[in-house]
Image (cartoon, helix red, strand yellow):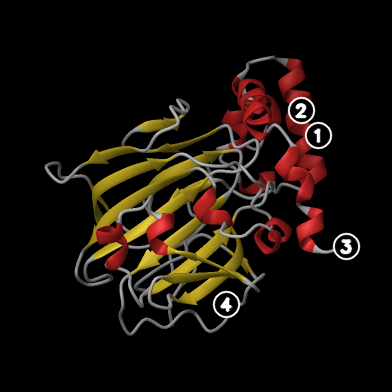
Amino acid sequence: MSDRLAVLPQYLLPKQALTRLAGLFASARLGGLTTAAIRRFIARYEVNMAEAANPDPAAYASFNEFFTRALKPGARPLAPARLVCPVDGAISQFGSIAHDEIFQAKGHQFSTTALVGGDAQLAAQFQDGHFATLYLSPRDYHRIHMPCAGRLTRMIHVPGELFSVNPTTARGVPGLFARNERVVCVFEGDGQSVQGSFVLVLVGATIVGSMATTWHGVVNPPRPGHLRDWSYENQDIRFSQGDEMGRFLLGSTVVMLFPRSGMGFNPAWRPGGAIRLGEAMVA
């Protein structure tokens, strides 16, 4: 079966309604029912609870608490690199941005302008720059950390679809990551790791109940159906490399944008390859 045929049912599913229901269940405190759901999830996806700060499934009052669980201190040491991987997961794609076009999968590209919500001036900063699209599967740790030091300047919530973001859907849905709901987080680099701005885009998906940042809290819901934009230029919100910056309440994808430079990705990276928070992103 072709990828396009495989994803056809997603066009017909009531994705918004399913996502709302999933969000309600994930936030509910249902005692033994919640614990049973967590245990079943751990078994189904082979989640490594030995890495969790609290490995006891019964300690989590809601599924969201379990899903956004913290890791033990030292579980993800930071490599001595200019940029480190911000998440656990798998590499969807990475490489150079061709003028304004980002490679999604064979036969599919999307523009940086569309990805950041239509702001051509913001997108122009990444013309011929670099990108990395990182997929978080259900079994992964779902907090997102900083690849390098940076100062927060802006956040944009872009409404959109809620297609799945798994590899089959990435091959079958044109412009997937610029069509789905997303939270665009813009940072100013420290001048050493990154000269100029860089962006982390948190991409929503089917049954991703919400996305949250450490400075704002839960961004969605609400889902008002129009673009929302926050400026932090007049605030001094700074992060060090490795600091937590956000999380998914049920998992998805992060797309990273960097300006044009002599950046060379980690030679061990391959599309489809596993990645770990804190490993070197660059050579």
- The image position of residue 160, as x and y in percent, is 51, 41
Q: Mark 4 or mark 1, which is nearer the start of the sequence?
A: 1
Judged left or right of residue 74, residue 123 is left
Q: Nearer the viewer, mark 1 or mark 4?
A: 4
The quarter of the image holding the C terminus is: bottom left
Q: Earlier in the sequence, mark 2 or mark 4?
A: 2
Between marks 1 and 4, how big is the CA–CA gap?
Answer: 32 Å
Q: 10 Å neighbourhood of mark 4: few (<14), some, or many (≥20)?
A: some
Q: Nearer the viewer, mark 1 or mark 3?
A: 3
Q: Identify the residue shown where x is 38% and y is 76%.
A: 99
SS class, disc 1: helix
Residue 35 lies, in percent from the top left, at 73, 24
Q: Nearer the viewer, residue 227 or 199?
A: 227
Residue wearing tag 3: 1
Q: What is the three-letter code of the residue carrying label 1? A: Arg
Compared across the picture, whether 53 is left or right of 15 comes to left
- Given residues 278 and 165, the one toward you in this image is 165
Q: Quadrant of the N terminus?
A: bottom right
Is residue 75 among the parts visible in the rendering?
A: no
Disc 1 designates what residue? 40
Residue for badge 2: 37
> Separation of disc 2 and disc 3 at Cα?
32 Å
Labels 2 and 1 touching (C-beta < 8 A): yes
Amino acid carrying mark 3 in the image = Met
Real-space CA distance between mark 1 and mark 3, rounded to the nearest whole angstrom = 30 Å
Quick one: label 3, few (<14), some, or many (20+) residues within 10 Å? few
Q: What residue sits 49% from the left and 79% below the top?
A: 266
Pointers 1 and 3 in contact (C-beta within 8 Å) = no
- Image: 223 above or below 154: above
